[in-house]
Image (cartoon, coloured by chain):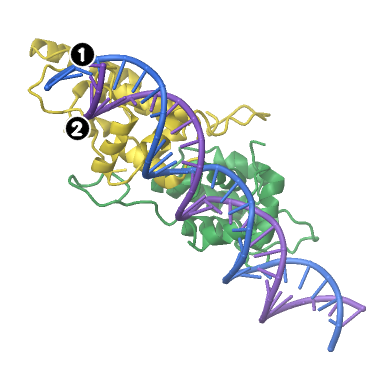
Chain colours: A yellow, B green, C blue, D purple
DNA sequence: GGGCTCCGTCCACTCCAGCGGACACGGCAG
DNA sequence: CTGCCGTGTCCGCTGGAGTGGACGGAGCCC
C-alpha cells in the first residue's frame, strides 16, 4: 500500500521494517514444531550446504532479534534463496503477505519439489490457497498420513529441507 | 527468461546483477540531455536535500561504475526514494522493465507532480503507456511546447528535479 | 594570463555489517 | 557425578561499505 496508491499527505516513513520479525516468522512457518526446529547454528550450517552462501549463526540471531538490521543485498539474497522466497519478501509488505499464504500450503506438503511447484502458483488468491490447503489436509487424512502441524513418525529420513529454487 | 519461470534443474545463480547499469540507466533516463545532466556531486547534494538520506558523491560513482555492488538496504532505499521507483526496481528484472516503461512517459511530462501521478499507473501494459507517450507528445506539439528528448529553451529556471513524491 | 566552477577519478580514513569464539544453561549417555 | 552436544547470548575482532577531501582537466568570465 505504501508503494501503491497511498493517501495524499502521507508524511510518515514506514521505512525498513521489522526484518527480524519477518525472518523469525519464516523460521517458525517452516518449522511449526518447536521440538524439531533447528537452532541458529544448525540453520546456518543448512544454509551453507544448500545455497553455498554463508551466514554465521551469530548473525542469524542478531538479525532475528533485531540487533542488526541494515543487511547487504548479498546476505539478503542468501536468505531468500534458502527459504525459497523472492528477495522482495523482506522489503515489500504485499509480497510478504502473498508469499505467507503460499508458505502455509507449501509447508503442509512437506516436500521440496511439490513446494517449489506450489510457489509457482503466483497469482492465486489467498482464499484459493487456503481452500487448497484444506483439500490437501483432507487428502492426507484419507491416505492415513499425519496431519500438518505434527511431525511424521518417519523412517529417519529428513524430508524437511528447504531447497533453493530459482531466486 | 532468466528471470521468469526457468527450466527445471536450473542450478546457475543469476545473482545480483548489474546494479551499476541500472543506476546509471536511471540517471540517463531522468536526464536525457547530457549538457544539463548533473554530475555525481550535484546529484548527491540533490539526494540529501530531497530525501534527507545521505549518499556521498564518491559512492554514487562507485556504484554507477560497478566498483562497489554489495549495497545495504538503507542506501538502496535512499536511491529508490530519490528516483521515485519502488525498492524492488534494483533487484527484480520484471519490475525494472515495467517501471522503465513508465519512466519514459514520466520523463516526457517533465513535471514532478505529474510524474508521481504517472507512476501510480501500476498495472497498465507497456503498450498502453507507449500509446500514452505518443498522445502526450502530440499534445505538447499542439501547445507549442518542445518535444521530448530536446531541452526547453526555457527562461533559465530548472524544472528538471526529481522529487520524492511521498515526502 | 589568473581565477572561478563544475566534472570524473582516486586515495586515506571511519565505522559498522558480519564472523569467530567464547560463555552459561539444559538434556542425555556413560 | 562427569563429559558431550546443542541451545541462546554475548564480546571482540576483521574487512569492506560508505565518506571526506584531495587531484588534474575542461569550460567560462575578467
x%, y% of residue B2? 30, 51
Residue placed most toward the observer, D11 or B96: D11
Q: Quadrant of residue D1?
A: top left
Point 19% across, 23% down: residue? A109
Disc sitting over residue A150 in the figure: 1
x%, y% of residue B137? 59, 55
User: Same chain, marks 2 and 1?
Assistant: yes
Q: Quadrant of residue B166?
A: top right
Disc sitting over residue B73 in the figure: none
Mark whose residue sits in front, 2 or 1: 1
Q: Residues within 10 Å of mark 1 (few under 14, many from 20)?
A: few
Could one spot residue B148 in this view of the protein?
no
x%, y% of residue B34? 62, 67
Residue placed most toward the observer, A112 or B26: A112
Reply above or below: A89 against B134: above
Q: Earlier in the sequence, mark 2 or mark 1?
A: 2
Residue placed most toward the observer, A90 or B88: A90
Point 69% across, 59% down: residue? B42
Residue corresponding to mark 2: A112
Amino acid at each position: 500500500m505504501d508503494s501503491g496508491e497511498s493517501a495524499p499527505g502521507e508524511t510518515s516513513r514506514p521505512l525498513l521494517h521489522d526484518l527480524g520479525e519477518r525472518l523469525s516468522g519464516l523460521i517458525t512457518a517452516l518449522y511449526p514444531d518447536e521440538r524439531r526446529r533447528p537452532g541458529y547454528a544448525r540453520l546456518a550450517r543448512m544454509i551453507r550446504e544448500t545455497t553455498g552462501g554463508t551466514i554465521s549463526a551469530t548473525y542469524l540471531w542478531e538479525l532475528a532479534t533485531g540487533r542488526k538490521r541494515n543487511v547487504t543485498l548479498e546476505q539478503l539474497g542468501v536468505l531468500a534463496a534458502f527459504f525459497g522466497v523472492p528477495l522482495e519478501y523482506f522489503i515489500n509488505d504485499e509480497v510478504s503477505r502473498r508469499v505467507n499464504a503460499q508458505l502455509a500450503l507449501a509447508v503442509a506438503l512437506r516436500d521440496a519439489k511439490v513446494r517449489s511447484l506450489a510457489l509457482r502458483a503466483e497469482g492465486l488468491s489467498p482464499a484459493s490457497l487456503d481452500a487448497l490447503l484444506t483439500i490437501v489436509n483432507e487428502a492426507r487424512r484419507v491416505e492415513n498420513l499425519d496431519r500438518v502441524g505434527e511431525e511424521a513418525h518417519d523412517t529417519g529420513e529428513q524430508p524437511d529441507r528447504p531447497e533453493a529454487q530459482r531466486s
